Image (tube, rainbow, N blue to C red):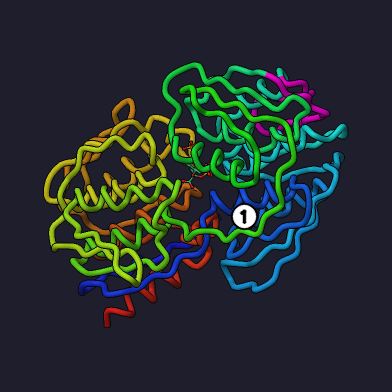
């Protein structure tokens, strides 16, 4: 079967655009799950509509929650969520969504009926073992150590130690449903450092905003007390990780991109773009219209530890490949367990266009070389596809395989990209 190719548009001139982004995947999927476990009906406004968010909605409905949408646009909606007793007997498709495969099983363990989980072929290789063992320790019956697996509760909760160095979601998943465990939960991490810590902070903050008591005072230990999850009416922030390719376009073209409603304070890792892009030569300012990023016509290479913000790696690597000096990206060994092995994928695809990228144990060394056109494969990874689009702004003839894979978190990507380039004409 041939995979469709998308001709990545060349910029031709500096971009001058305002790009309004749909809601954060990470906030949307936490908010929906917490609403489904809450002590009354709640509302999640400006929620992302995308493959990952739709999979979460379907999973919560399969477990008994009532979700109805209003104010639907192609990539956003308000959800009215009516919680119900968690019901077993369901089969859940997690797609390739880390947030669905790690956040929903602990909730399913609240039911005394069996719940079956499966996902895309690559999802079967993503790390699940530590959270499934933890659920066993906490009282659930679990068959399997990776997708596909089944779970049967009811779980009682208590104390558990796991190695979460492969993904912060292994911790977040256990914490999110824990107020509903009879004994709550104490999660201890033991192993190499946990990546993407801002995402655990997001989990803790969202639990606290729902009146749940969480103690995170000791490093690598999280205690969630049992108790009700307060129903809320919350509005989802724009997805700052998905801002990355658009802001990168400002650097690549020496233009300006403004993102409206950039939060003043946030736990989204994408907020690190402000400092990362400034280090790569951009002027980054907060203006009344949002966050404004202007490129100076040259991209500086960077030596950066992206351990906390691994999601940004594909975009930063694309920029590094177009920079005026070499870059070293470190601290992202866990990217090998993402949508694809992102370190291998980035090295292979950038090198396929004439680049010089070498993999290290925990990152990439990128030496800029003159690039030429060709096929840039995306490996069902939304952020690989958008990285190809960034390179295509400056390199004629780049064809990105399967741009539709961006629907995982940004179904409108290709249209928004074209509009951004239009605004400059
Ligand atoms: O909790 C979340 O919403 C996420 C946590 C991070 O996962 P890892 O810790 O596996 O990197 C991040 O990369 C992912 O896109 C979203
Ligand atoms: C790692 C990512 O996704 P997931 O939530 O599937 O882990 C990502 O979006 O970069």
Q: Is residue 211 above or below residue 74?
A: above
Q: Is residue 211 above or below residue 47?
A: above
Residue 328 position in % (x across, y down): 22, 36
Q: Position of residue 306 (x, y in %)?
A: 33, 38
- Residue 123 in which image quadrant: top right
Give the residue drawn at x 61%, y 41%. 207
Which quadrant is the C terminus positioned in? bottom left
Q: Disc 1 designates what residue?
A: 53
Magenta part of the chain = 138-158
Out of 113 and 283, give the one closest to the viewer: 283
Which quadrant would residue 313 be assigned to in this image? Answer: top left
x then y, percent, for residue 346: 34, 43
Q: Is residue 305 left or right of residue 337?
A: left
Vertical side of 249 occupied by 164: above or below: above
User: Dominant secondary structure of the magenta stretch?
Assistant: loop
**Whether the residue under disc 1 has CB within 8 Å of ligand 2:** no
Q: Which residue occupies the foreground of this view, 393 or 201?
A: 201
**Residue lying at 29% horizontally and 48% vertically, measured from the top left:** 316
- Is the residue marked by circle 1 packed among few (<14), some (14-19), or many (20+) residues within 10 Å? many
């Amino acid at each position: 079967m041939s995979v469709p190719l998308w001709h990545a548009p060349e910029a031709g001139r500096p971009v001058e655009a305002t790009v309004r982004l749909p809601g954060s995947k990470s906030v949307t999927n936490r908010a929906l799950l917490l609403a489904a476990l809450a002590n009354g009906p709640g509302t999640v406004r400006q929620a992302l509509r995308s493959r990952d968010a739709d999979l979460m909605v379907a999973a919560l409905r399969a477990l008994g929650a009532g979700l109805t949408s209003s104010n639907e646009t192609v990539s956003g909606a308000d959800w009215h969520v009516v919680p119900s007793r968690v019901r077993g007997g369901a089969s859940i498709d997690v797609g390739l969504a880390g947030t669905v495969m790690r956040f929903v099983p602990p909730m399913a363990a609240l039911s005394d009926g069996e719940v079956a989980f499966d996902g895309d072929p690559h999802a079967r290789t993503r790390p699940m073992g530590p959270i499934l063992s933890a659920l066993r320790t906490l009282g659930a019956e679990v068959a399997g150590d990776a997708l596909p697996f089944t779970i049967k509760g009811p779980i009682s909760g208590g104390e558990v130690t796991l190695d979460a160095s492969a993904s912060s979601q292994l911790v977040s998943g256990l914490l999110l449903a824990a107020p509903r465990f009879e004994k709550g939960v104490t999660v201890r991490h033991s192993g190499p450092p946990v990546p993407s810590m801002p995402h655990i902070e997001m989990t803790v903050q969202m639990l606290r905003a729902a009146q749940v008591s969480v103690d995170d005072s000791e490093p690598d230990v999280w205690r969630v007390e049992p108790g009700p999850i307060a129903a809320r009416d919350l509005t989802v922030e724009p997805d700052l990780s998905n801002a990355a390719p658009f802001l990168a376009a400002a650097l690549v073209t020496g233009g300006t991109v403004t993102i409206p409603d950039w939060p003043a304070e946030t736990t989204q890792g994408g907020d690190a773009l402000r400092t990362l892009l400034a280090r790569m030569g951009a002027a980054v300012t907060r203006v009344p219209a949002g966050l404004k990023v202007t490129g100076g016509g040259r991209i500086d290479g960077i030596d950066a530890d992206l351990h906390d913000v691994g999601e940004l790696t594909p975009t930063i690597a694309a920029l590094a490949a177009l920079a005026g000096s070499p870059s070293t990206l470190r601290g992202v060994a866990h990217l090998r367990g993402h949508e694809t092995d992102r370190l291998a994928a980035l090295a292979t695809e950038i090198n396929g266009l004439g680049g010089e990228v070498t993999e290290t144990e925990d990152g990439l060394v990128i030496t800029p070389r003159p690039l030429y056109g060709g096929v840039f494969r995306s490996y069902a990874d939304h952020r690989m596809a958008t990285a190809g689009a960034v390179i295509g702004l400056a390199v004629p003839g780049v064809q990105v395989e399967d741009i539709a894979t961006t629907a995982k978190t940004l179904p409108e990507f290709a249209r928004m990209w074209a509009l951004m380039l239009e605004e400059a004409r």
